[in-house]
Image (cartoon, rainbow, N blue to C red):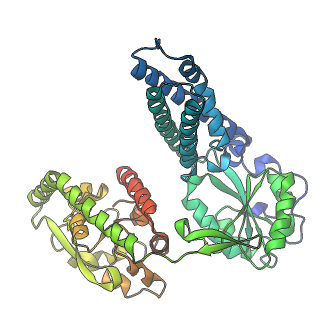
Amino acid sequence: MSLHELSPAPGSPVVGAPRPRALWLPSRARTERRSSVTWLPGYVRRLAAGDLAAIVLSGVVGVLVRFDGLRPAGARPSTIALVLVLPALWVAFLVAFRAYEARFLGVGSEEYTRVLRAGVFTLALVATASWALDLGIARGFVVIALPLAVVLTLAWRYAARRHLHARRAQGRCMQGVLLVGHEAGVLQMLGHLERSRHHGLEVVGALLTRGAGRGGDRSAALAAHGVPVLGDLDDVAAVARAEDVDAVVVLPGPLLDGPAVRQLGWDLEHSRAELLIAPAAAELTGPRVAVRPVNGMPLVHLGRPEHTGSRRLAKAAFDRAAALAGLAVLALPMLAIALAVRLTSPGPAFYRQERIGRLGQPFGMLKFRSMVSGADALVADLRGRSEGNGVLFKMRADPRVTRVGRFLRAYSLDELPQLINVVRGEMSLVGPRPPLAAEVAHYGDDVHRRLLVLPGLTGLWQINGRSDLSWEESVRLDLRYVENWSFAFDFAILWRTFRAVVARHGAY
């Protein structure tokens, strides 16, 4: 029996007697996948134990370095007291700075930020107390133990997060959510959540605004994703309690105005579910978004995207300096790759292809040749076997790719010569995917915004599936980057690129 078959028939009551668990998932799977009640407390306890181990180890290292042994002869009582109470103090400050709060764990930078804040506060408090009260705490111990504790805690948190993401990739340690809104918005949000399983949000069901229907043709698209329609706006609180979900995600719409959302928040106070409101401008994030209060009403301020100005000049300078450094470090490996390409197949070591850059200016993008010579002329014969996104030609087992080329493409080594394009100012380290002229010819006005910035050697498309992306998803990611660029965004993408290349996601 499918989940769609379990959707209520038109006119039938949505919420009645609780559904038997077996109709949804086996009890153990339902507990592990849809509820944070069982897995979250254990995860937090393990985090706290690791944080405690980090501060204890840091204290031991601080004592060894400062006093040349675990018996600090000559240390003042205040220093010894600090060594003994520091573990409890560290965990207490992490609690105070909400470093164990569920909404900050597992995704985003907020968890790390709160650890850093706790570390800075602890260091400032110890230093100030020592000076103000003339305690004479050994400064050498403090400047070694506390910074080391922050570093070890961050490393532990990162390792724990990676393990959590691995479990979520298996469908475990998830949080059940309900999506509320009109069907088109629900489907869009469902796509976002399905592409970001590591965020740990699993859709249990949808509640559609009136007129969208319950079941039937209007919910066929949701049923295709295994998401049942469980009712409408009047049923949200009852369904949230019946399904024991962790969160309710509300999509913007004419029927979900301020009073309706406020009432929904009141109704959910008697359940475990948190209320999450999706913004109307979902693709605008980061430094462009700020809250501006006006007479007690919070207005969301959307700043202009930074396509010019001093920060863009700084980005260009950083890109060129980093590319020059990369070429210096990788000169010998690139020479070895060039020799391998030349010796294993006839033809040049490099391949030059015209791409479209900033403001529509064409340039010659460089790559190591990974296909046989004259591969472009063979595209017409292979067009019917394309596995691409409908716009770009892609094949997982492309017969034109050489043996060395297959290895180069798997780890994106064929793209290293694009560092030369970066030095020449034709590309950036991070940016939208460099398009072909044939693609640009089909761009609409909105997609043309991709050309407002330099194309990148890597970007959101590189870390979110590469060749596995649909055309629409590729465009959406590029536009998100253009609209939300920042230095922090670039550094996060560069870090994730390394992981994506090693994992070979979507590379062929």
Residue nearest the observer in this picture, 69 or 338: 69
**Residue 417 located left or right of residue 199:** left
Quarter of the image for the N terminus: give it: bottom right
Residue at 33 percent across and 80 percent down: it is 358
Residue 258's place in the image compared with 327, above or below, is below
Observer able to see residue 444: yes
- Locate residue 172, reporting x and y percent: 62, 44
Vertical placement of 310 versus 57: above or below? below
Q: Quadrant of the C terminus?
A: bottom left
Q: Is residue 196 left or right of residue 485?
A: right
For residue 296, above or below residue 155: below
Q: In x, y percent, where is residue 349?
A: 13, 64
Viewer-proximal residue, 160 or 110? 110
Splitting the image into 4 quarters, where does residue 381 fall? bottom left
Q: Quadrant of residue 410?
A: bottom left
Residue 440, position as x, y percentages in the image: 37, 84
- Residue 221 visible at all: no
Q: How many marks?
A: 0
Query: In the image, is 499 to the left or to the right of 27?
Result: left
Residue at 78% over, 60% down: 6
**Residue at image x 37%, y 75%?**
392
- Where does the image place residue 321, in percent across and percent down from the top left? 25, 61
